[in-house]
Structures are given as structure tokens and as C-alpha cells.
Amino acid sequence: MATENLSITELEQVVVRFSGDSGDGMQLAGNIFSTVSATVGNSISTFPDYPADIRAPQGSLTGVSGFQVHIGSKPVYTPGDLCDVLVAMNAAALKTQLKYAKPQATIIIDTDAFLKSDLDKAAFNTSDYLGELGIDPDRVIDCPITSMVKFALMDSGMDNKSILKCRNMFVLGLVCWLFCRDINLVFSFIKEKFAKKPAIAEANIKVIQAGYDYGYNTHSGAMNVYRIESKEKEAGRYMDITGNKATAYGFIAAAEKAGLKLYLGSYPITPATDVLHELSKHKSLGVTTVQCEDEIAGCASAVGASFAGALAVTSTSGPGICLKSEAMNLAVIMELPLVVLDVQRGGPATGLPTKSEQTDLLQCLYGRNGESPMPVIAATSPTDCFYAAYDAARIALEHMTPVVLLTDAYIANGSAAFKLPEINKMYPINPPYVPEYLKGSWTPYMRSDNGTRFWAVPGRQGFEHILGGLEKDDKTGAISTAPENHDLMTRKRQDKINKIIVPDLEVIGDKDDAELLIVGFGSTYGHLRTAMEEMRASGKKVALAHFRYLNPLPKNTAAVLRKYPKVVVAEQNMGQLAGYLRIKVDNFVPAQFNQVKGQPFVVSELVEAFSKL
């Protein structure tokens, strides 16, 4: 029976969660499925959920890796609260991931991975694992995936270990059948990914076809065939992009637009390392990457590259911000452009290195010695990471200041469909180079009309100078300890940041008559927007104001926050944005919604909490 002759259900959206051991390739299977979905015009939002263990024992409860993707015919803003289809490659995955599935979800399991030894590792008490978890067998597609993969590849000449690595491709083929995906798009992806290993590509394609054929031929009672047609398509070139890759591309675009070389000085740290990996691939675009011996060296080398005239970037996560702070302060007092990327993760200390939080906000705003004002921008989604990185570089270059760009593990590792921008249509970046007519009268801290220090790149005759970490005289640039001069320079550095123009804070939803204003920043945008839309659909008057620019704040911030009778600030920390806004806006006392779980918000929990307000 052909798929086209089946009863096909049209869906507006669906959530699929792939789960298994960290070596089972769930991230790859999920990424391919989301890429194919983006290719056909669906809106997607993904959430890779990595275990914190480097490599937990196989089949253990702590070693389960997950990848959730939300696919929609219209824009989707979150990876979804609960999944409609759960793939569980072993007993541990089923036990730990069932809580992320809807009560009526379809569950795909590899029955070969539910032997007594597997059940013991996953701490099941009986052999009736479905009954123990309260799962209706009619919801389950119980397939001997391991056996079928071995059969499909028995003539391949591959060893058993290599064959078992292809199990994820069988599941991918089955899920593609469930959602009427063009399997040829998957084959093209595999051929491109393994272009230098054709035998591996051929084996994976064979297994994908086997999984697809299993769905085609069996039509298990748990199976329903779905199609998600794109309702809102905009012409252009698209790719499925992660936040870290988008961030790297944003830096490359900014360097090209400014006519500069791009330099990244970094030290590997989860979850920021992928930015270093991605930029290291693009030497042909004038990108230089240096993996330094520690965090402060990475930042200090970037300060040197900035002095030499490059667009300088350093990347890290929260623990690295602590270690970089001295070198960041050096860029503040030297007034050199620098972008500091902080891909936030769970803390404190090593904390939850593969999980996500928003707990570095106050550290990035205030966590340095002395008065050291620094612009702070927070990206709102995986695709916004591109534009936020571009904007952070523009502000750094045009205002001669270090800038902190906040992302976090959720949007850095998550992905979405990204329409490739046209570089010639992006706004220009114009660094304040010292004009030639000042030769002979120029001093290092001479400023333009907006208070920005002129940039004299080494090599220009007549503009030789020295910068350093000691306070300098405003007029001569010589070292100065004069009290009045230090007060003046401190105020000028602050005034320069205050004069940076950022867009007004936008309010969406019932912006004119909302009874409740939801406030957030950064990566929680999708969840807060979805919660707002669900509440409005139920008849409530609700609006959302989401901060992307945190220092300086938009000029209309106080007016917006004072306009509504009730305001709730929702963030993945213990109240850092709420406290910051109380400092900046007189008599502002909002309600708060705070979670520090290392996981994204759950929309249903937001709706319940906000409705009580």
C-alpha cells in the first residue's frame, strides 16, 4: 500500500523527541530530521538535551541524551512542552524521557534493548516495563531495531560496532515515513555529510531505507501518517542553523561589512566551543582563531588584536567570564573594541555544564573591579544569534568599547530555520578612525562628537601611541593619578555608553490595554511569547516586553514598565533582571517568576502562574 493511499492527517504542528545513550546518535538523527523539515518550508525549533556526564555507562539512567524538535506549518517559538512522538532506544531512555511525552504520544522503542540486563540497569522492578510505567501498549511501536539493522547490513563487511552505530538511521527513516518526509532529501544530506566516506554513506542510506520501509510495510496500530504543510513561506535561501553557528556567521558578516580581519582568542569550554570550531573553518574569509592556554590569555590576545586593528572576539561561558574579567577591564580603560561572547550554562562553579541558565546577567553588568561600564546584548533565539553578534560587533567598533553578547546553552545548541540575509542590505559598520587632519595634534584620548575615542590603528605615521591599564590624562594620554582627572575619565567612559542609541522596547500583544505585562530577556522569548498567545486566546488581556538590549536600556523602558497595572518578570535565575530594573526604574516593584532547573521554561507552567496574577 502506498503512503499516498493512506489516511493522512494534516497537522499544524508536532513535537518529536529522540532519546537514547549518548553514543546512539540521537543528536544527529534529530538534526537531520529538523534540517529536512526546514528544507520543505516548515518552521522549526529544537532543543538538544545532553547528559552532563562525559560518557556515562551504557544503558545507565544518567547517560541518556535527548533531542526534541517542534515542527510547525506556521512560526513556532519553542521546542514544545511535551512530545507527540517519543523515540526511546533503550530502557533507560524510556524511563527518563517518558515525562516529556504527552499521555497520548506514540512511542517507538527498540525491543532488542529491553532485555533483562537493560531493565536492571534502568532500575525496572519487573519485566513488564510498559505496565510498570503505565504505558498503553497500543501507543507503542515495538520494533527489533538492532536486529533489523544487522540484517540490513549483513553483507556490508562492517564490523558489529560500526553496524550498531547505524541504529539511529533506522529510526530516522521510520520517523520520516510517519511524517511524509521526502526520503531523497535525507539521502542527499547523508551523501554530503559523508562525501569522503562513501561506504559509510551507503550503509546509512540502506538503513534509512529499511526504517522507512518498515513503516511503509507494517502500519502498526500505533502508527498514523501525518503531513505538516507550510502555510507561510517567504522566498529566499534557508538553512537549519544552530545558535552557535549563527553567532559565528554574525561575527564574520560584521568583519566583512567593516572591512576588517576577524580574530577570535578563545579557550575551549562547554557550551561555547562550537563557535571556536566553526570560525576555525573560515580562514579563507580572513578569520584567525587562536586556542589559548587559558581564559584570560584568550581575552588578552583579543585585546592585542583589537589594538592592532582587527574585529576582536573572545568566547566563553560563565566560569570563563570570571577568569576573563581582568582582561575585559583592560579593554574598558584602553577603550578598545572587543566582543565578549558568554554562552551561559548552569552554575555555580562547574555546575551543570551541558544545561542552560540566565544566571550571568549581573556578573556581565557589574562583575568587574572599578567603574567599568560595558554594553550588554542578549540574543533571543538561535537565528537571532546572527543578528545579535553582528550588532554587538557594530556597537563595539563604532563606540570603541568592549561589548558582552549573552546567549545560553538552550539557543546555542538549539536550531531553527534561518533565511540567509543579503550582506549588502545589512546596515553599515563605520569604526571611528582618527581623521588625517588631526595628525600632529592628536592624542590617544581625543574624542568624536558622541564621546567615542578615535581609533588609531598601528602603522599610520604620526599617530603612534601607547595604551595601558593605568589611568591616563584626558588631554595628553600620559599616566595620571590626579583625582579630578580620574573622576572625569570615569564619567566620560560612562557617558560614552549612555549615548549608544538602541531601539525602543517593543510591546506585543494587548499593548494598549493589557492587565498583565510579561517581561523577560534573551532566550526565554519564545516561551514567554507562546504563553502570552495562549492566554490571549483564552480571553485574557496580556502583553509582552522582551529585552534584547540590557545596557544601555532602551530609552522608553521606564514608561513601558509603569504603563501596566501588573508586571511579572520571568527569568531563569533568582531575579537578576527584576533587581536590575528596580535599580534603573524608580518605584518599580514587579511580580517574579523564577526557575533555575537547567531546562527551558514549560509554557503550561508559565500560563498557570501568570493566570493567577
Image: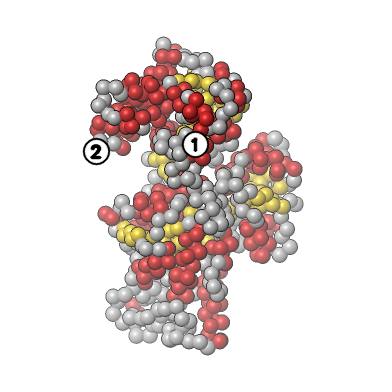
- Work out whether residue 90 or residue 563 is closer to the camera in this orientation and state it: 90
Which residue lies under the disc numbered 2?
196
Marking on residue 85: none
Most extreme residue toward the bottom is 482
**Residue 183 in view, yes or no:** no
Q: Residue at x 66, y 46 (%)?
A: 543
Q: How many marks?
A: 2
Classify residue 529 as left or right of residue 65: right
Displayed quadrant of residue 554: bottom right
Across and down, in percent, residue 211 comes to 39, 22
Could you tell me the amino acid type at mark 2?
Answer: Lys
Q: CA distance from mark 2 to mark 1?
A: 34 Å
Q: Residues within 10 Å of mark 1 (few under 14, many from 20)?
A: some
Could you tell me the amino acid type at mark 1?
Answer: Ser
- Work out whether residue 326 or residue 165 is closer to the camera in this orientation and state it: 165
Q: Judging from the image, what secondary structure is the residue with disc 2 in?
A: loop
Classify residue 585 as left or right of residue 197: right
- Work out whether residue 528 or residue 127 is closer to the camera in this orientation and state it: 127
Which residue lies under the disc numbered 1?
60
Q: Earlier in the sequence, mark 2 or mark 1?
A: 1
Q: Residue at x 32, y 54 (%)?
A: 280
In the depicted structure, whether residue 291 falls above or below residue 41: below
Q: Judging from the image, what secondary structure is the residue with disc 1 in?
A: loop
Quadrant housing the N terminus = top left
